[in-house]
Amino acid sequence: MIQLIKVCGLPVERYFNPEIMREESAQRQRVSHKLKLCPEQYLPIIEGAIDGALKMEQTAKQKEDA
């Protein structure tokens, strides 16, 4: 079963710890799965996009608090 999951690129958590998957939104599950399939060479681009989104969120929260 583990080999089948690896070959198909399926999220292991879904089959061995379904409680974790229930806690995450469907969109977060899709993004997580796509991230696992992404070639290593493109991860810096994705990390930069995530960092930018987090910085925007932090800035918005700081403005709300001011």
Image: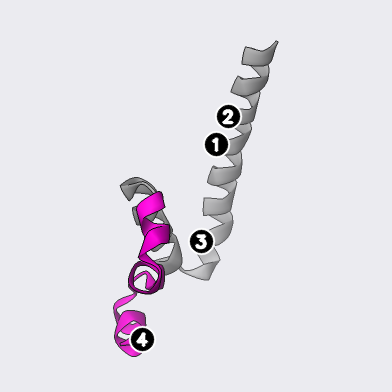
Specify which label sits upstream in the sequence, 4 or 2. 4
Specify which label sits upstream in the sequence, 1 or 4. 4
State how far apart marks 3 and 2 are (Cα): 23 Å
Looking at the rendered image, the disc whose residue lies closer to the viewer, 3 or 2, is 2
Is residue 34 visible in the rendered image? The answer is no
State how far apart marks 4 and 2 are (Cα): 38 Å
Residue carrying label 1? 53
State how far apart marks 1 and 4 are (Cα): 34 Å
Residue carrying label 3? 42
Q: Position of residue 60 (x, y in %)?
A: 60, 21
What residue range appears in magenta? 1-23
Residue type at mark 2 is Glu
Q: In which quadrant of the rendered view does residue 49 lie?
A: top right
**Quarter of the image where the C terminus is located:** top right
Q: Is residue 14 magenta?
A: yes
Looking at the rendered image, the disc whose residue lies closer to the viewer, 4 or 2, is 4
Q: Position of residue 33 (x, y in %)?
A: 38, 62
Is residue 45 visible in the rendered image? The answer is yes
Residue carrying label 4? 2
Residue projecting furthest to the front: 19
Looking at the rendered image, the disc whose residue lies closer to the viewer, 1 or 3, is 1
Does residue 18 sit above or below 47 in this rendering?
below
Q: Are marks 1 and 3 in contact (CB under 8 Å)?
A: no
Which structural element holds mark 3? helix
For disc 1, the neighbor class at 10 Å (few under 14, some 14 to 19, many from 20) is few
Does residue 18 sit above or below 65 in this rendering?
below
Q: Is residue 4 left or right of residue 34?
A: left
Magenta span: predominant SS is helix
Residue at the spot 30% in from the left edge and 87% down from the top edge? 1
Residue projecting furthest to the top: 66
State how far apart marks 1 and 2 are (Cα): 6 Å
Residue type at mark 4 is Ile
